[in-house]
Image (cartoon, rainbow, N blue to C red):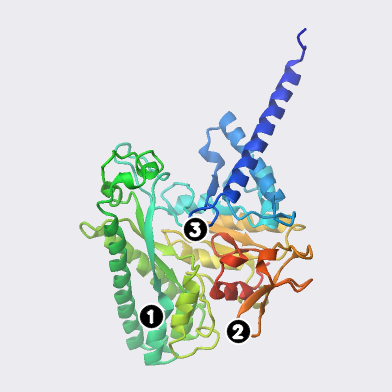
Amino acid sequence: MGLQVTQEQFDKMVEMSVADEIEKGVQMIQYQINTLQTTNGQSPFASLFIYFEEAKPGRDREDLVLVTKEILKQRIKGIKNKAGTWVAPTFPKILYVLSENNCKEGTPYWEVTKLAAECTAKRMVPDYISEKKMKEYKEGNVYGCMGCRSFLSVWKDPETNKPKFWGRFNKGVVTINLPDVAFTIRDKYGDNSFNNNAAVAEFWKLLDERLEMCHRALLMRCRYLEGTPSDVAPILWQAGAIARLKPGETIDKLLKGGYSTASLGYVGLWETSKALSGKRHTDPEMIEFCKQIVKHMKEKCDEWNEIPDQNYGFSLYGTPEESTTFKFAKRLMTHKTLPGVNDKNYIMNSYHMDIREGLNHGVDAFTKLSTESEFQKYTNGGAVSYVETSHMENNIPAVLAIMDHIYENILYAEINSKFDNCHKCGYSGEIELVDNGKGHLIWRCPNCGNTDTAEMTIIRRICGYCAGANDMNEGRKGDIKGRELNV
């Protein structure tokens, strides 16, 4: 005897079955990524790129919306740590594109964006890409970044004359210590070097010398790869992860012409300006000069790509500063001391404003994002800005306002918050960074005093991605402790 159902009942059952499959599929991906480990013991650095306009209108796009909602719901829920508390997983990153179809109230996918805001308030993801600004900077294209912030340059397939992004790759980065150039000039000419024509001329000369050193180092990286047979990594080079080369064929044709990129990184524009003038790089007297520094480095990359047999796809990149922040800061300590600038164990990331100057210094989230966007547009190889917030779970309209500002003003940005957990006492909130009395920063539960990071779940934005307490060096912890709220 057959069961008689109406078309409406049948459609409802199908919808429920699809929803169940989506829930299980998203859960499987999330748990697999966070339980697998790479050869160095880390979770795979994976990102989910969500751009509704990438899917065809109709069923394809509506299915993408359904999957996106489930991704956000499960990230809000989190995963259980060993103490059984629901916490934020580190990966995958979620890259959510703000577009004209989702970033304003009344647009078709506004409800999804509100869910994204709720997820950001609790779990620090998604990260946000502005369709408006990306089309402006990337010849009308919209695509995801690699890793935490690296954006490929636009490259067109000669056979189709259409842009290609997925499957391409970056050959590595070499970073210039900009403040070291400036402090070298300050050591010779004094505190107000910026108002000394000879000092400024020598600054540009020394900058070019250091840039050429980076250029030579990048050439070594790129040329080292030449002659590599595709057989060394068949999944990458032969099976289509990056290319479909023949066995025995070298990867050489993928190294030049812009198919892959090579990054000139930079850090410490704030310290550079302070060393030369005593003023911030966003000060009215310094901002144009500092924009010229960033623009000059981008133009150098363009020049290198025009040199015969050197078109490796050089581009300017805002370095993430993982271990670099501590290493470069220690180098600056060899120069004459400038209080508050080269006497700390970290330096500011790329073009970022001083992390110690937030609301108490008149730098709110909107001011920070608008100001930093002036530098981000020159950093064509990748850059990310972020703002620091307090707990925003009960202020979703404020999160949405920041997201709208990102859409209108800056290519790529993130919103930081803090949701930690102590396994010993069950405390949820912000685990403190305190001095241990020996000149080192340690994590301490404000409730029970626990200092064992193996008994805590701590997630912080390193810069473009989130990491746990045990993945941070002394410089990065100093940076995190110094961050002042922008909201």
SS type, badge 2: loop
Q: Nearer the viewer, residue 307 or 217?
A: 217
Q: Which residue is mark 2?
A: 439
Residue at image x 53%, y 46%? 49
C-beta proximity under 8 Å, tags 1 and 2: no
| Comparing labels 3 and 2, the label whose residue is closer to the camera | 3
Instruction: Identify which residue, 204 or 197, lies in the foreground.
Output: 204
Give the vertical position of 118 relative to 56 (above or below).
below
Q: Tell me if residue 361 can be seen.
A: yes
Above or below for 161 versus 444 = above
Residue 487 left/right relative to 132 = right
Front-most of 96 and 201? 96
Circle 3 sits on which residue? Answer: 40
The x, y position of residue 345, in whole percent, is: 53, 79
Q: Dividing the picture into quarters, in which one does residue 462 lie?
A: bottom right
Q: Is 301 on the left-hand or right-hand side of 68?
A: left
Q: Can you see residue 58?
A: no
Mark 2: amino acid: Gly
Q: Position of residue 259 (x, y in %)?
A: 33, 49
- SS type, badge 1: helix
Which label was assigned to residue 11? none
Q: Secondary structure at mark 3?
A: loop
Asked if the residues shown at circle 3 and circle 2 are in contact, with their CB atoms under 8 angstroms apart, the answer is no
Q: Nearer the viewer, mark 1 or mark 2?
A: 2
Disc 3 marks a residue whose amino acid type is: Asn
Q: CA distance from mark 3 to mark 2?
A: 29 Å
- Earlier sequence position, callout 1 versus callout 3: 3
* Residue designated by label 1: 181
